[in-house]
Image (cartoon, rainbow, N blue to C red):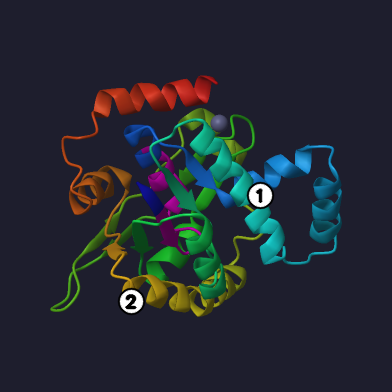
């Protein structure tokens, strides 16, 4: 089971990939986490990374692939039965290189209509005290002849957090639309690459997590194969750790 999750920033890719990885007992390998972990180390590589990040440079493929190769070797030494990769590959060239170090079996492409994605990103709030994540956007787009209804209710904070709500400084409409534009440009060749290999599964998000999670399991033929109870306790363990 060597899976890749694709999806625009803000679509909830990390949430679904990590839930699924917990339920299937395989590591969730998020490229962003690998980079952050390396930055905390005291190594020549970490110095090089810090320098690039501080100058606002994109990380070269070679460097990102080095981190990923190391992580995949750990997984294989751990005798993991697979992994779910998130945040990589971003380009078709990275996808081709990935084929030389892994055997990707499935690529889940999470999709969400752009206007809904923008509304949900603009609605994101974080509590400055407990760091809880909330969303004040209440999305309800009625169904049309060609498109199904999209219903994503707000996730409102409890009263004690209400006065401590903050927004991410990069969650402005302009920045979000630019993120979406760059993502679409880069991701199309990646999607085409995997579609040509017959590995791409397009999955349209039409609701919040409680509605989307069972639909995703069903699209992956995993209904009944992931116990909800073990999932909840696994998530609690992860939080406790
Ligand atoms: Zn709070």
- Give the mark count: 2
Q: Is residue 76 left or right of residue 220?
A: right
- Residue extending farthest to the left is 145
The relative height of residue 236 versus residue 162 in the rendered view (above or below) is above
Query: What is the spatial separation of the Cα atoms under label 1 and label 2, in whole angstroms?
Result: 27 Å
- Label 2: which residue? 196
- Label 1: which residue? 67
Q: Is residue 106 left or right of residue 131?
A: left
Residue 6 forms part of the magenta stretch: yes
Q: Give the range drawn in magenta.
A: 4-19
Is disc 1 in contact with disc 2, using a CB cutoff of under 8 Å?
A: no
Q: Is residue 45 left or right of residue 148?
A: right
- State which quadrant residue 129 falls in: top right
How many C-alpha atoms fall within 10 Å of the one at disc 1: few (<14), some, or many (≥20)?
some
The relative height of residue 155 versus residue 198 in the rendered view (above or below) is above
User: Does residue 112 show up?
Assistant: yes
Task: Check disc 2 and report its element: helix, strand or loop.
Answer: helix
Which residue lies at the image location 55% right of the left edge and 66% below the top edge? 97
The relative height of residue 19 versus residue 218 in the rendered view (above or below) is above
């Amino acid at each position: 089971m060597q899976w890749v999750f694709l999806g625009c920033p803000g679509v909830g890719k990390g949430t679904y990939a990590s839930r699924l990885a917990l339920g299937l007992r395989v590591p969730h390998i998020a490229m962003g986490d690998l980079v952050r972990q390396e930055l905390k180390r005291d190594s020549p590589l970490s110095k090089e990374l810090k320098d690039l990040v501080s100058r606002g440079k994109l990380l070269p493929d070679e460097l990102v692939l080095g981190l990923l190769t190391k992580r995949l070797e750990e997984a294989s030494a751990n005798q993991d039965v697979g992994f779910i990769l998130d945040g990589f590959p971003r380009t078709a060239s990275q996808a081709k290189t990935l084929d030389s170090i892994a055997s990707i079996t499935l690529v889940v492409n999470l999709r969400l209509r752009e206007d809904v994605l923008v509304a949900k990103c603009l609605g994101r709030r974080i509590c400055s005290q407990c760091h809880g994540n909330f969303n004040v956007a209440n999305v309800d787009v009625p169904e049309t002849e060609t498109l199904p209804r999209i219903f994503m209710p707000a996730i409102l904070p409890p009263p004690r957090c209400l006065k401590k709500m903050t927004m991410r400084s990069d969650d402005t409409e302009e920045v979000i639309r630019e993120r979406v534009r760059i993502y679409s440009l880069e991701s199309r060749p990646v999607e085409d690459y995997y579609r040509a290999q017959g590995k791409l599964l397009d999955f349209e998000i039409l609701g919040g997590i409680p509605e989307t999670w069972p639909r995703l399991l069903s699209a992956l033929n995993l209904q009944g194969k992931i116990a909800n109870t073990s999932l909840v306790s696994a998530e609690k363990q992860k939080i406790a750790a």
